[in-house]
Amino acid sequence: MQNLGGLIIPLGFLAIFYFLVIRPQQKRESKTREMRNNLKVGDEIVTIGGIYGTILKIKDDTLTIEIGADKTKLTIARWAIGSVTNEIKSK
């Protein structure tokens, strides 16, 4: 019985750590992975480096994006996409 008392507190801390740190991180990673898998040509994106652009071509794990007024083209890795900024356009 005394051994169980010594295990309750560490197990409680592990449970709290799991629900406050690990689980939310897994949810964020899952949403990010889903967003990167659902990219399509024409999406407006922001890279993790802060570059705004529009997707021109998707090939495996690389994307070609167009940035700036002079329409510069960059090839970047899919994991470098931070977010999609498409706004709902009225018809």
Image (cartoon, rainbow, N blue to C red):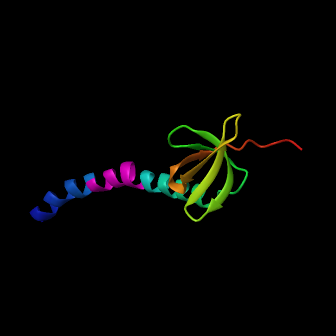
Q: In the rendered view, does 8 fall on the left or right side of 79?
A: left
User: In the rendering, at what x and y percent does residue 88 appear?
Assistant: 77, 43
Tell me where residue 60 sits by quadrant: bottom right
> Between residues 78 and 29, which one lies in front from this camera angle?
78
- In the picture as drawn, the residue positioned furthest to the top comes out as 69
Q: Is residue 5 above or below residue 48?
A: below
The quadrant in which residue 15 appears is bottom left
Residue at position x 44%, y 56% in the image: 26
Left or right side of 26 for 58: right
Q: Which residues are magenta?
A: 14-23
Where in the figure is residue 66, as x and y percent of width and height?
67, 45
Picture coordinates of residue 64, whole percent (x, y): 63, 53
Residue drawn at x 38%, y 53% as measured from the top left: 19
Q: Is residue 68 within the magenta segment?
A: no
Relative to 82, 69 lies left or right? right
Q: In this orientation, which residue lies closer to the viewer: 10 or 21?
A: 21
* Magenta stretch holds residue 15: yes
Q: What type of secondary structure mainly makes up the magenta span?
A: helix
Residue at the far right in the pictured view: 91
